[in-house]
Image (tube, helix red, strand yellow):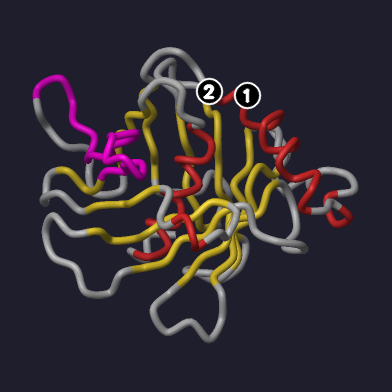
Amino acid sequence: MAKIYPETLKNSSSSSSSSSSSSSSSSSSCYVTSTRETFTIWMKSLVYHGNGCTVFNSKGDIVFRVDNYQERNSNEVFLMDLSGQVLFSIKKERLRLLGRWSGYLSGGFKGKPWFQVRRNWKYSKGDVICDVNLGCDKSIGSCYKIQQIDKKSLFQISNNTGQLVAKVNQKQSSRGFGYGDDVLTLEVEPQVDYSFIVALVTICGLIKHKL
């Protein structure tokens, strides 16, 4: 069985912002494909009495997992691959009334976050739930937007040009029967880092108190 506890990358605590860009390109290259990828997200942890979620690819293999060994709705979670290596460390910033989450490459929370998600509290159907910035550069505006569509389609993620990059729905069988609110289907468009998209879905799970 795969390792249970996160295995942070060596020297991650001493990584600087200058090396984070090269690290991001190398770590994400294996998670970018030329075809649309479909995943099943089970909002449950495989760890007994644990909280988190498990991500399966279209072949039924586990590719990502989030295991929270603390209380539910923790302020710190880790997105790992099957072997237990941390891909993203996600932390909810304190003293932020509107809600903001920071994502760091690999293990630890030192240095500048690789991306930040800011929650929009005043939204209705069709409105933006969250704005996503890469590299914490607010001057260039939001790089991605997470948008609520309707009750059947939980949300979708689009880039700064409005192009759809990912969509999350409740998973249904071939006969149209749902598997429950905690089983989702994630579709990621080609040439998009799906590990990063899963990190955003993880934050949405924290917002909706499902992790």
Res 29 label = 1
Which residue, given by chain and number where applicable, does mark 2 sit on?
A: 32
Residue drawn at x 32%, y 43% is 157
Residue 149 at x, y percent in the picture: 15, 49
48 sits left or right of 173 in the view? right
Disc 2 residue crowd, few under 14, some 14–19, many 20+, Cα 10 Å: some
Judge by depth and name the residue closer to the eye, 197 or 46.
197
Disc 1 vs disc 2: Cβ atoms closer than 8 Å?
Answer: yes
User: Measured along the vertical axis of the image, is residue 88 above or below residue 27?
Assistant: below
Res 98 label = none
Q: Is residue 127 visible?
A: yes
Tell me where the magenta segment starts and ends, as one range. 156-175
157 sits left or right of 12 in the view? left
Real-space CA distance between mark 1 and mark 2, rounded to the nearest whole angstrom: 5 Å
The amino acid at mark 2 is Val
Say which element carries label 1: helix
Residue drawn at x 42%, y 57% is 141
Residue drawn at x 33%, y 35% is 166
